[in-house]
Amino acid sequence: MSAPAAIPLGTLLAPRFLATRNAFRRRPLRAWALAFLTGAFWVGSFLLFAQTLRFFQTITALGPVLTQRLLVMLFVSFFAILVISNVVTALTTYYLSPDVRFLLVAPVTRRRIHVARFIETLGASSWMVLLFGFPVFLAYGTVFHAGPLYYGAVIATLIPFLTIPAALGVMLTTVLVLAFPARRMRDVLVVASVALVAGGYLALRLARPERLASPGELAGFAAFLAAFEAPASPYLPTTWAANVLLPFLGAETAAPLFHFALLASTAAVLAIGCTAFVERVFLTAWSRAQEGREGPGRERRLGHWLGRIASPLPHTTALLFVKDATIFFRDASQWSQLLLLLALVVVYVYNFSALPIDDGSPLAGTLREIVAFANLGLAAFVTASVAVRFVFPAISLEGRSWWALRTAPIPLTSIWWGKFWLGFLPLAVLGELLIVVTGRLLGVAPGLTAVFMATLLLVVAAIVSLGLAFGAAYPRVDTQNAAQIATGFGGLIYMVTCLGLITAVIALEAWPVSRIFWSRFASQPINGGETAAIAISFGAVTALTMTAWALGRRSALKSLKHLRV
Amino acid sequence: MIQCIALRKQYGELVAVHDLDLEIAPGEVFGFLGPNGAGKTTTIRMMVGLLEPSGGQVLLGGHDLATKPEDAKALLGYVPDQPFLYDKLTAKEFLRFIGGLYRVDREDIADRSVDLLEEFGLVDRAEELIETFSHGMKQRLALAAALIHRPRILILDEPMVGMDPQGALALRQLLSGLAASGVTIFLSTHSLGVAEELCDRIGILDHGRMVAQGTLAELRLRASEFPELSGSEDSLESVFLSLTGTEDRRA
């Protein structure tokens, strides 16, 4: 009897492709909006990058070195992100995704399953790098007037360059699954990735890139970049990739073909090795991942302590608080985001402490005024960024357990209030702290700080209400990862709405705040007419934020009423 | 105790439930049968407040679910067909949370949790996260949660699915006991044996319409109108097949 014909790869990859296509077909408006935003991002990144590269070209001695080092650094960054991303993605596509069992019971060879999953992992992990990389490579090509060969070389380089971390990631994941329980491992990976992002963000900021704006400081930074030797090791694929492209950009690096051969052969060897390894151990590793549920361990009794904290709250609010907070602290994908929040706050405060506002120059006075204006908007923006991570997913996280709340004898308004206070209280404390601390660093008068604090309280109320509204209108109950919920279309629209609201508030308050500021700074007393105008401005801010709050509340309740899970 | 008056659900042109009328007395066990896609789960979702009807009314203990939802729901215990619970809570924490939603006294929740977890064979797993439970265990926990506030009405959507034979037997005994103590039970099931054994009355839904309801004897009588389909058998299965039969017969 002859062996059955191999299942075409297209068949195995079809579900993912069809699901994506159907999602776009069902919501064409969303697809167009995403395409527009991607286009805008590309144009913005391209312009920024091209500007930077042109600036480097003006530095006679160091320009070419900087350009080359920057390309190597980009490849190093992409490579690091790709390895982490592939490890996390492979864990899901190979070992946690429920559809693997369909494939395992079907007459499909393990090699075929591996190849299909490998392509899926590579695609899911690499699209972000391609999204960021496209305008960067285009900027290089444009600034250095590269010919069509350069663009061909970019494509030819990226294929093996993306394959190497995918093969490494899949193998590493498989080894880890064989060694540790899959669920515990997922938690560790989630926390590690978030910590890496937060650490990278902190490092980037604390490296003070603003020094580039000062010619004196630039020399030091350029020397640092020029001395950035470690990643330029001749044994790293990142160096090979850069060396393939650099000759097309006018650099005098030799042997692009040799480096391409190194890159391609390494990718081929790793891909074949990965196939042989995974094919051999896949069933063992998959079985292990299924057995790898957490054993019968007793959970820490968080509820006891949380119950005490929540005791002053109304009954239903307290219940929801204890439940949500318990889940929050047990779910690594949720609490790990606190690390990002911490990095965000540190950078925010650091930015203000690093501002040159105390050097007595006329520029410092103007800067202080501008920053005083911007401070409220920035604090509100930080609050909105945190809200998109913590408030927006609140409804989705109820997920398929929504029936338990909906069939209980509690009105929807109670559920809404419970979620509102859970979002509002911590965000208000965070926002007010930012205003007070940065206000002190800037030397803002207590009266003005009080105005900012009152405004921010209103803005936070509106932001939280809108978060619940958009969260209920665009629920994502299919994902177990809280961080993913915020990255969808709903989260994007929510952020844009928040930005619009914050801009409107700043626009309404710009003149009154400026007037109050100058009345103190330049001793210009405020007259009766101005007092009335200031009152009208603040009244308009109150009306705007309260309208947003009320509309958000009404919309959330309407969506919750019709929420079908 | 449960009343549905001209209950209707429509999705655009498609009518999923056609003006359903139903009345179930206190302490009665009502079996809700029907082929797949007949509209059973849609009906149940409207009866428990998970889905807004397009028309009609649901009264639970005389309280209108639309105008007095809290009063109506306070009488109700519900177990869905897919018991999705909060994975990151322990069984005990979940029962405490649900008991709290129904305003059960804290001490009472603690005592009742122990009793219910014992009854459903989960007492040894009380402090473990629900994500480590099997489907059957989650089903049993959902049942325990539905009973934590001593409901007067219990609505169960396919409660035997995923249960082992011991669990299913224990559930049947439990439901009989609850009915004897005056709890009204509305049970959707595909198991005709369970319906035959437990239910005082049975309703058969097909294409969103109640094609028959009554005691088993009444249904047999009704089915005898179609001897070519029911044959000589007088089991519930033959009655069910007669009444939900083939497209040709319905036509």
Image: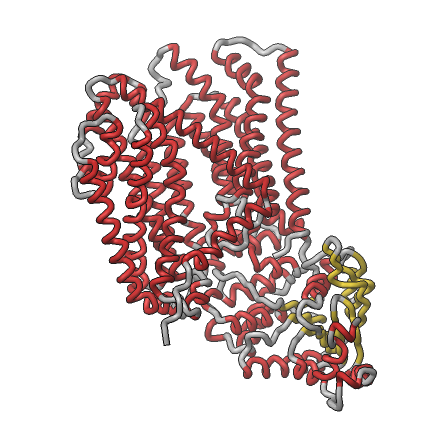
Rendered location of residue B178, percent (x, y): 68, 78
Q: In terms of depth relative to the viewer, which is nearer, A495 or A108? A: A108
Q: Residue furthest front?
A: A2
Is residue A184 placed above or below A107 in the rendered structure? above
Tell me the quadrant of the picture where the N terminus of chain A can be found. bottom left
Marks counted in the figure total 0
Residue B107 seen by the camera: no
Tell me the quadrant of the picture where the C terminus of chain A can be found. bottom right
Q: Residue at x 51, y 41 (%)?
A: A388
Q: Quadrant of residue B232?
A: bottom right
Is residue B207 placed above or below A130 in the rendered structure? below
Q: In terms of depth relative to the viewer, which is nearer, A523 or A508? A: A508
Q: Quadrant of residue B198?
A: bottom right
Residue B200 seen by the camera: yes
Rendered location of residue A363, percent (x, y): 39, 12
Q: Residue at x 54, y 54 (%)?
A: A477
Q: In terms of depth relative to the viewer, which is nearer, B251 or A366? A: B251
Q: Quadrant of residue A188?
A: bottom left
Q: In terms of depth relative to the viewer, which is nearer, A212 or B246? A: B246
Rendered location of residue B227, percent (x, y): 79, 86
Lateral position of residue A509 relative to residue A1, left or right? right
The colour scheme is secondary structure
Rendered location of residue B138, percent (x, y): 53, 70
